Amino acid sequence: MAAKRTAASTPGQRPDPAAGFLAPRPEPAAAPNDPLREAKERAVPRSEQLGAAALGSARRFVRASGSGRGVKVADDTIVAQAQSRIAAIRRDANLSPQGQQAGLDAVNADVRQQVQGVLGKIAAAREETAPGPGPGTVRLKADPLLDSLLMFGTGGQVAAFLDAASGDVAINDALWAARALIGDGGRLQGSPKKLDITAAAMRAQARMTVLEDWLARQLLAARLDQTEHAVRLAASELFRNGFLDPAYCATGVFRALDEAPAGDLAAYFDAVVQSAVNPTASPWVLQPDGSLVTGGAIESEKAGPLRTMADDSYSQI
């Protein structure tokens, strides 16, 4: 019978590779050596500028204020004002059940109209600021030297070609070639120079003059997804309950509408884009049609109280 495997490492000892330990590689964009760091930092305020109309409209609809136990929906938002109107209608003992329902229906109709206005601005911003193909995803011009590199170039030559590329078109096509060579099924996929090629590609991408604008649009796309989710969620809770559960304000759902915090803007960029690329940090994942499906994570506090999938009020907004 095989001996039981021991722990990969113990205090004061080097990890034992035979025990299954695998030293983690740093992420390609890990700070502080990320060659795109400065471009990402500049992209954050640029994304705020590009999405000013949509983001501003959403913040007027709902946003969180305060901190700790004092966190709540900001008093000057449409949602907070609707909550107050609903509470007043429910407290009014002089209203008949029919009168109360008529008052609640009027509030819901007003909120629904406001929601459609915000969602319209978000849709318009998406259309106007779509990031388009990323650097190196399409080839832009014919180049015999690039064709030769694709057929015969070594890993070292590809890395040198990337480092020598200048101008947005040449860099784009060099990135395209590198992706084709080291990607799935590429001729250099198993090359020992693959990491060198990846590093050279990151350096080349950082030299593109269009990169900052593309990154800003990519960031804004992720922020608009978060914004739509927050707006739809706030409206849904108002229609269902007449108020928002404080848990939503205390977690990241409405904080996503805040302007970028002071500090490490490159880290902020990475966090927002990652949440859009891999949204399973939320128990419910927003679909293009406005419906929700279950996510794969257990960090439910990030999205506030859970609802059953039988509740489709969210998709009716």
Image (tube, helix red, strand yellow):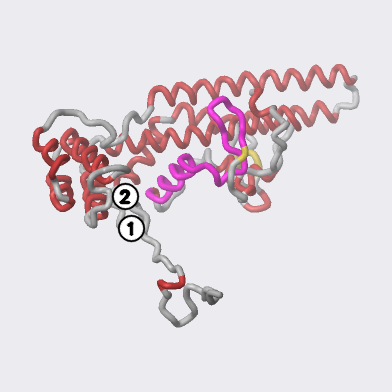
Instruction: Please report contact status of discs 1 and 2: CB closer than 8 Å, yes or no.
Output: yes
Height in image: 92 above or below 47? above
Q: What residue would you read off at disc 2?
A: 37
Q: What residue would you read off at disc 1?
A: 32
Q: Given the image, on which type of amino acid does mark 1 rest?
A: Pro
What stretch of residues is rendered in magenta? Answer: 266-293
| Residue 22 placement: quadrant | bottom left
Gap between marks 1 and 2 measured at Cα: 8 Å
Height in image: 73 above or below 9? above
Q: Position of residue 98 (x, y in %)?
A: 87, 17
Q: Position of residue 260 (x, y in %)?
A: 45, 44
* Quadrant for the N terminus in the image: bottom right
What residue is drawn where x is 53% and y is 34%?
227
What residue is drawn where x is 41% and y is 78%?
14
- State the SS at label 2: helix
Which numbered tag is attached to residue 79? none
Classed neighbour count for the residue bearing mark 2: other residues with Cα under 10 Å, few (<14), some (14–19), many (≥20): many
